Amino acid sequence: LVVGWVDHVRDDDRWWLEPDVVNIGYNVFPAYRVRGHATCAVLLMLSLLRADKDWVVATLLIHPEYVPSLAVAERNGFERAADVEGRTFWRRRLAHDLN
């Protein structure tokens, strides 16, 4: 059963991203929203990004009126950083294993 998608991107079109920063994007299809799927998907993506070790910080860019996504950011330990292009910009440092 597919309930949505999650991905990550780092490209020059996102001028607000520094070289070691990656943006996470996600969407849950309307019939499956408000069930924790987005929170879980972002958490799993954070785990993958930590293992990759190319990234130091993960970000989310969220429309300020979309309360469920703002809650996803908070539940996953992101901190509000600024406003970018009319949306709220959230950051979270990725902790990498030192081994």
Image (spheres, grey):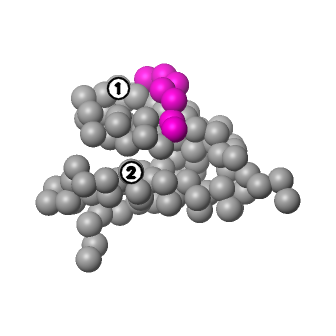
Residue 21 occupies quadrant: top right
* Upstream in sequence: badge 2 or badge 1: 2
Local secondary structure at mark 2: helix
Residue 14 visible in image: no
Is 35 left or right of 45, judged from the image as shown?
Answer: left
Outermost residue toward the left in this view: 31
Residue 17 visible in image: yes
Residue flagged by tag 1: what amino acid is it? Answer: Gly
Identified at 32% across, 40% down, the residue is 69
Question: Residue 28: x percent and y percent?
Answer: 27, 57
Residue flagged by tag 2: what amino acid is it? Answer: Thr
Q: Nearer the viewer, residue 59 or 70?
A: 70
Cα separation, mark 2 vs mark 1, equals 23 Å
Prevailing secondary structure of the magenta residues: strand
Is 34 left or right of 98, judged from the image as shown?
Answer: left
The residue indicated by pointer 1 is 86
Q: Is residue 61 above or below residue 8?
A: above
Numbered range of the magenta stretch: 77-83
